[in-house]
Every structure is written in structure tokens, then in C-alpha cells.
Image (cartoon, helix red, strand yellow):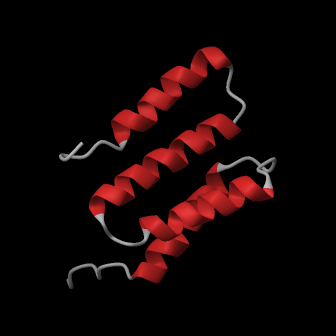
Amino acid sequence: MAPAAVPTRAQKLADCRATIADATPATLTSAEAAALDQLCTIAASGNARRVRAVERRICIAIVQASGVPAAVLSAERQTCIQETQGSTG
């Protein structure tokens, strides 16, 4: 069995965009969608530290756009932060 191919920058960008499209509500404004798309471009760079930071920002943006109650929002944001911390912080 051959080892899995390393995704190209274009594949990473497409995967990021697909994740956002699947996870975000239809009420996303065009400005929010553009900002998330820009974050996907950064995430596709392959720089691990920048990728984690972008993943964190995308996660938080999705949580905020989801309309969860304020009481839940803080905990969900903390989850985004915890799940996107790498060995360099």
C-alpha cells in the first residue's frame, strides 16, 4: 500500500473552504464569508503556527455565527482555543 500523498496547497484550500461551507449557517454575511475565505488562504500556507491560529479564528467565527446562547458561547470559544493549541502554543 502506497503512503498517502501530501495534500497540495490547492487541496488544503479546497478542504478548508468545504469545511466552512459545511459548518457555517446560511446566514453568513458576504463580509464574514470573505474573511473566512481569506483565513483559508492563510491556512493553506502550511505554516503550522499560522494554520493553528487560523483554525482557531475560523472555529470562533463559526461558533459566533451559529447563534448559540451567550451562556454557551464562552465555553465554545474556549473549546476552539484548546483544540487549536499546538506544541508551540
Q: Does residue 29 appear left or right of residue 14 in this picture? A: right
Q: Quadrant of residue 62?
A: top right
Q: How many numbered markers are drawn?
A: 0
Q: Does residue 82 appear left or right of residue 86 in this picture? A: right
Q: Which image quarter holds the N terminus?
A: bottom left
Residue 58 place in picture, x, y as percent: 53, 49
Residue at the extreme top: 71
Residue 69 place in picture, x, y as percent: 68, 20
Q: Nearer the viewer, residue 9 or 39?
A: 39
Residue at the location (36% across, 52% down)?
52
Residue 3 in the image: above or below residue 15? below
Residue 62 in the image: above or below residue 41? above
Residue 28 place in picture, x, y as percent: 76, 50
Residue at the location (29% across, 82% down)?
5
Q: Does residue 4 appear left or right of residue 36 in this picture? A: left
Q: Which image quarter holds the C terminus?
A: top left
Residue at the location (44% across, 45% down)?
56
Q: Nearer the viewer, residue 32 or 16?
A: 32
Residue at the location (67% across, 26% down)?
68
Residue 15 place in picture, x, y as percent: 51, 69
